Image (tube, rainbow, N blue to C red):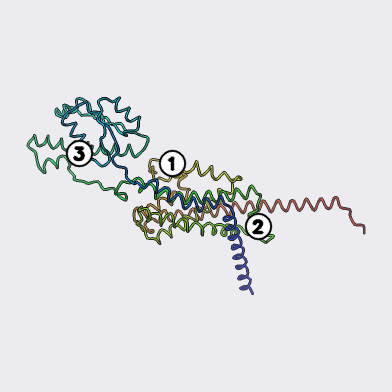
Amino acid sequence: MNIQRLIDAFLTRLRDTWHVYVLELRRIFRDWGVMLIFFVAGLAYPVLYNIIYLNNVLEEVEMAVVDMSASSASREFIFRLDATPEVTVTHACATMAEAEALMKAQKIHGILYIPADYESTLMTGLETAHLSLYCDMSSFLYMKNVYMATNMVMLDYMNRIQIDRYEAMNISGEMSWSLVQAVPFSTVTLFNPTGGYGTFLIPSILVLIVFQTLFFGINMLQGTAREENKEVFILPGRRRRASVFRLLIGRGAAYFVIYMAIASFGLLLIPVLFDLPHLAMVGDVLRFMVPFLLSTIYFSIFFASFQRERETGMVTMLFSSLIFFFISGVSWPWESMNPFWKALGYLLPSTWGMHGYLHLQSMGAMLETTSREYNMLWLLAAGYFLACVLLYGYRAWRMDTAARREQALRRQFIEQHLPQKRL
């Protein structure tokens, strides 16, 4: 008998959870705004971002040279600079004013100024020769290419000057090279050998798209329910409330099923289609997506409970996009970040999702070696689920208290105003 009761109770809870799950799916598919966010933005944004950054590496950035030295040393430097793949010297200007006019017209994106005493300073070796470099800061990539090309040519030129001086002192061959570079080394860019901006940026953006579209969609549904004064605690076709656990599990399952497919498209298929780094095993990425989606779902449900208008989620999404990206520590290292922003980043599922996804896909790590991010996502999922349980439980208690008070007032009114039957 007790076993039958347990089975009946389990089936009842399962049916209640299923009712909540179906109800949430109906709310999603009947809301065109949410459908637009989930299925259009969630699927189109990854493609759009990759099309924008399809030219992954910027080459041959136009720049001008103002050569006041007009010497063989300055001409050799300009020749080596023009030979680099990052820049091309398109203009030789007589004055800085002429070069500045070209930069204002966006015909060039960098200016190299070589002073008149450049060669004489190199020959004497008593003073340091100076070069002045001016970069167009309207785009980070312009500055990066101009600065990197000039810096690499300058370092190579300095090594050759030192070798010439050692040879003048009858020190040549391997001895001169060992004095210039005591420890031979070569630079290898890990996990991004082409130095592409898209290869660096897009993988983390894909994770942020999943996080923000899911966050915004849940906020829209919650705001709509508040505006229409709908009661999300009532089971369909029932005159009683679902328990908080059944309610949250049913709602979370509806979002999880939809976004497991959307996230698989963005995090698994898009890297293959656009030749982004995809070094991870498919099973590892899928397993990593489970706690990431669960933590994002209950994070969104928790914060959606505090908003009353449908448009609040849009405003939040617009101003928080760059904040979420920067405090994740992807574009700016955590070591140089303010402790407050670092602590805030720890509370966001997007932060751990971006780090873990980069470890898996870009660095080729196994799920076991990125266990810190994986475990933190499970911890955030459990923490936000518990926060939702407490918040919904408190609101359900307030609703029950208000209902009982209303019934007591109604009973008191009836007793005071209706005539009493005489015995």
Check the image and name the residue furthest to the right: 423
| x and y percentages locating residue 42 in the rendered image | 48, 52
Q: Residue beneath label 1, please?
A: 339
Q: Residue, x 16% and y 26% (percent of image)?
A: 120
| x and y percentages locating residue 291 in the rendered image | 47, 57
Q: Which of label 2 and label 1 is nearer to you? A: 2
How many numbered circles does the render carry?
A: 3
N-terminal label among 3 and 2: 3
Q: Amino acid at mark 1?
A: Pro
Q: Residue beneath label 2, please?
A: 234
Relative to 212, is 178 on the left or the right?
left
Q: Amino acid at mark 3?
A: Asp
The relative height of residue 236 versus residue 200 in the rendered view (above or below) is below
Q: Amino acid at mark 2?
A: Ile
| x and y percentages locating residue 399 in the rendered image | 68, 52
State which quadrant residue 288 falls in: bottom left
Relative to 82, is 415 on the left or the right?
right
Secondary structure under the numbered disc 1 in the rendered image: helix
Give the distance between the C-alpha atoms of the residues marked 3 and 1, in whole angstroms. Answer: 40 Å
N-terminal label among 2 and 1: 2
